[in-house]
Image: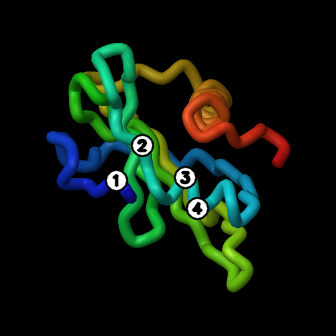
Amino acid sequence: MDVKKSDWKMMPIPVEKVDLGYQKVFRAVDAKKIMSGYKPEDMDDRWFIYCEDNWVYFVRSWTGYHIFGFKLAVSPDGSARVVASWANRNPEEYQSKSKGNDIQTINDLINGIFGVERDA
């Protein structure tokens, strides 16, 4: 079952955000997994991930802050390409070290939660 925005209590998408320039193409099977989202199962799960209007949002489960977002363009075969991305830059919600660090975090989350390899 797909995760919905209404499945979690969260704060609004931040006004202070920066374009990440994240670029990635996902195979159809991986795009489907990512777009289905992820709902934390216990307190150790730090992320809630949902998809709305082809935007995939990464939300910190404890605070409800939107940290990352990326938009997918889905091809007829089901594969998907990232066409836009951002990271939260509100210092009260997220303190980033760099865009590179943010991209690494997104890749680690996608790999760890959805089992999608970095160079798939």
Residue drawn where x is 63% and y is 60% of the image: 31
Alpha carbon separation for disc pair 1 and 2? 6 Å
Instruction: Kindly identify the amino acid type of the residue bearing the numbered disc 2.
Output: Tyr
Residue 82 at x, y percent in the picture: 64, 61
Is 43 placed left or right of 103 in the picture? left
Amino acid, disc 3 = Ile
* Residue to which mark 2 is pinned: 38
Q: Position of residue 93 (x, y in %)?
A: 28, 26
Q: Which residue is mark 4?
A: 32
The part of the image, by quadrant, that contains residue 52 is bottom left
Of the numbered discs 4 and 1, the one sitting upstream in the chain is: 1
- As measured in the structure, the alpha-carbon distance from the residue carrying label 1 to the one carrying label 3 is 10 Å
Q: Position of residue 34 (x, y in %)?
A: 55, 52
Q: Provide the residue designation for mark 1.
A: 3
Residue position marked by numbered label 3 in the rendering: 34
Color style of the picture: rainbow
Camera-side residue: 39 or 55? 39
Residue type at numbered disc 1: Val
The residue under the point 41% across, 49% down is 57
Left or right: residue 15 compared with residue 108 = left
- Distance (Cα) linking label 4 and label 1: 12 Å
Question: N-terminal of the two: label 1 or label 2?
Answer: 1
| Badge 4 element | helix
Q: Residues within 10 Å of mark 1 (few under 14, many from 20)?
A: some
Callouts 1 and 2 close, C-beta under 8 Å: yes
Residue drawn at x 33%, y 28% as measured from the top left: 41
